Image: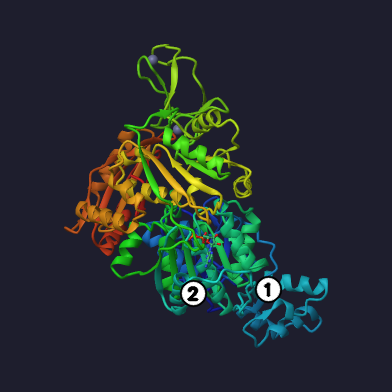
Amino acid sequence: MIEPSEGVTREPRIVHVALDVPIDRLFDYRLGADMQAPAGTRVLVPFGARETVGVVFGSATASDTPPERLRDVRRVFADLPPLPEHWRALVSFTADYYQRGVGEVAHAALPPRLRRAAPLALEPDAYALTEAGRAAAVSLPGRQKHRRALLEALAGQPWRAAADLPLATPAARRALHDLVAAGWIMPHARESAPCDAHPAPRHALNAEQQAALDAITGATGTFAPFLLHGITGSGKTEVYLRAAEATVRAGGSVLVLVPEIHLTPALESAFGATFPGETLATLHSGVAETERAIRFAHALTGRARVVLGTRLAVFTPLADLALVIVDEEHDTSFKQSEGVRYSARDLAVWRARDAHCPVVLGSATPSLESWHNAQTGRYRLLSMPQRARPGAKLPPVRLVDLRTEPMEDGLAVPLLQAIDATLARGEQALVFINRRGYAPVLACGACGWAAGCTRCAAHLVVHLPERVLRCHHCGLVAPVPRACAVCGNVDVVPFGRGTQRVEAALAARFPAARLLRIDSDSTRAQGRFAELAEDVREGRADILVGTQILAKGHDFPRVTLVGVLNADAALVAADYRAPERLFAQLEQVAGRAGRADRPGEVLVQTRRPDHPLYLALARHDYTRFAATLLDERRSAGFPPFVHEAVLRADAPELTDAVELLREALRAAPPRDAHVMVYEPVPMTLARLAERARAHVLVQSRSRRTLQAFLTAWREQVGHLRRRHDVRWHFDVDPLEF
Ligand code: ADP
Ligand code: ZN
Ligand code: ZN
């Protein structure tokens, strides 16, 4: 039997705390008599020899931990209202589904600033009495007049706005801080009141936009997943904005996820114009730590009503969530590829279900998973097959056959002629090649040696402006060798081409044109992309050369020609998702042409002009191409017709990684015919940053069966003896093989 340590109170004095440790359970701690820590509160606790911040997930009057091992909560953070039940449910679901510890997920879900052992200096905008505060108020000496006034103001009310509390003097504010520190008063998340959006000048919606908007707003208050399939330029942003406005006006809040905010400044400014000031909270990894925590807090308290963010924003605890939007839902950057490996798109759908609200997944080229869901009726399909601007049309696509057309420096003559004509009309041309750097390989013409990364199983990429070799996987930088490392031949040459080489070729061919290279090298500095995009829009560039950064949802009205180089390379990729991605990328980049009233054109250089992917692209026929791909996936037994997960291991030596996987297989729970488990194989990128990588693929037609198997298996893998330098993790719905 465990005696309550205080001996007097029956209140729950034990809290179950989620900690960022790789052991999947909650840890019990004793709460001091003067502390209040309801579920959702952050607390500082000792763990081993260190102290760490955890989140309270529950409480009890007694613990299974022996009293002599039970340690005390060191500190309770009362800077924010407790993280709400729906946030904890999201964290728990994520942990279960992605096979991680609740504490690891809770930690990853908090902005970094809130994981630190220092409270956020934030003035909450509402407060409520705690149990202890209610009890203590009775016996407070009359001379503590500020404390008494505060307790009286809060007594008998569920909560009160800070503005309505007697806080006029510094002494009164000190008293408030003392009461919060003593656990008598807590910050409170106020229920949000309806809030007005800014009436920005707007287009009148066309019939398709209106129909989409009506469907979304008509589903208010119910879980309703929509797939908004709108071609490039069909005006999806306008639909998102209006749906968000209607939701905020009705007192709800809105979560909007986008792949990369800094690459879509136009979307951000459209939302900024509609939702002024604190109503909009933008969240991404570029926001300074404290500011990010404050915005997270504002969403929690209902002060911010629209959260616009990248995948990490999916964990924002919005008050009164009433609409979820995922723009460019096919984009793979919604998948977190390190640490807790979650899909923000899929979690966004889960959140909408949990909050009983509509969710809109928007794309011109939906993921096959979402498309399949729309085909089978799990999602409602909303189509916008026309460009929104009057007169704007999808550009014709011309396939330039490299087997017959002459090339100059990697550029086919018809493309050069088209650029000439575009420049002559005073319009802009965009040349797309999805590879940055100068050349992807530096090789010896005599013996075939190629410069490789010493840390990865990958070639080093030549970067000419800095005259270095770079590894695009681990970031290693090496000098350009003067001679072949094997045979000493001094004639080492760059093979293939990247953006820098194409830029150089275009500069030589069009000396009078103003060239702009836009890739992750040229846009690394904060705000640089927005500047370059502005240059493009203002007509301060004639030819743009860039990677898929340029394919995202930009609106460059002067671009009328898009040239695509080297797309064939992706046709031979081993990954079964490669065609889906290539089509999406090309359709997106093609969609940059002719968005305004001037007609556009797309030229694709290829040696395989009869490939079904290009033929579909030439017709802008996503629907038929998706049907073809889905047929292939069905007969090959790939997602979305099966569900997948991998157990991955990495170690300095491949044999050790594989050995761990073999042991894991031996320890795997018995499986029925509905779970397929494959043999360990090295990953496609078999070595990354000095770690060899291998994995075991698991498939099942039933998600539930797969989940049950994984949960049982993880337990077993956790018990394996392993060398300290061998690591493992599960990746559920993996995108990387
Ligand atoms: P998408 O995101 O679907 O590719 P956008 O939302 O960027 O398309 O819209 C493309 C262009 O069409 C923008 O310049 C936008 O201002 C314009 N637009 C949107 N809706 C309308 C409309 N109803 N009438 C006229 N122009 C519109
Ligand atoms: Zn050589
Ligand atoms: Zn490397």
**Where does residue 683 sit, x and y in percent of width and height?**
33, 40
- Residue kind at label 2, given as amino acid type: Thr
The residue labelled by disc 2 is 61
The answer to whether residue 656 is left or right of residue 190 is left
Observer-nearest residue: 187 or 641? 641
Numbered circle sitting on residue 546: none
Vertical comparison of 490 with 407: above or below:
above
Task: Find out whether the residues at labels 1 and 2 contact each other: C-beta distance under 8 Å.
Answer: no
Q: Residues within 10 Å of mark 1 (few under 14, many from 20)?
A: some
Vertical comparison of 605 with 89: above or below:
above
Observer-nearest residue: 85 or 381? 381
The residue labelled by disc 1 is 125
Question: Secondary structure beneath disc 1?
Answer: loop
Question: Secondary structure beneath disc 2?
Answer: loop
In terms of image quarters, where does ligand 2 lie?
Answer: top left
Residue 735 in view here: no
The answer to whether residue 233 is left or right of residue 139 is left
The answer to whether residue 195 is left or right of residue 5 is right
Observer-nearest residue: 569 or 595? 595
- Residue kind at label 1, given as amino acid type: Asp
> Which of the 4 quarters of the picture holds residue 266?
bottom right
Observer-nearest residue: 229 or 308? 229
| Number of numbered discs overlaid on the protein picture | 2
Asked if the beta carbon under badge 1 is closer than 8 A to the nearest atom of ligand 1, the reply is no
**Where does residue 517 sit, x and y in percent of width and height?**
55, 38
**Where does residue 180 sit, x and y in percent of width and height?**
68, 71
Vertical comparison of 104 with 197: above or below:
above
1 or 2: mark nearer the eye: 1
Residue 455 in view here: yes
Asked if the beta carbon under badge 2 is closer than 8 A to the nearest atom of ligand 3, the reply is no
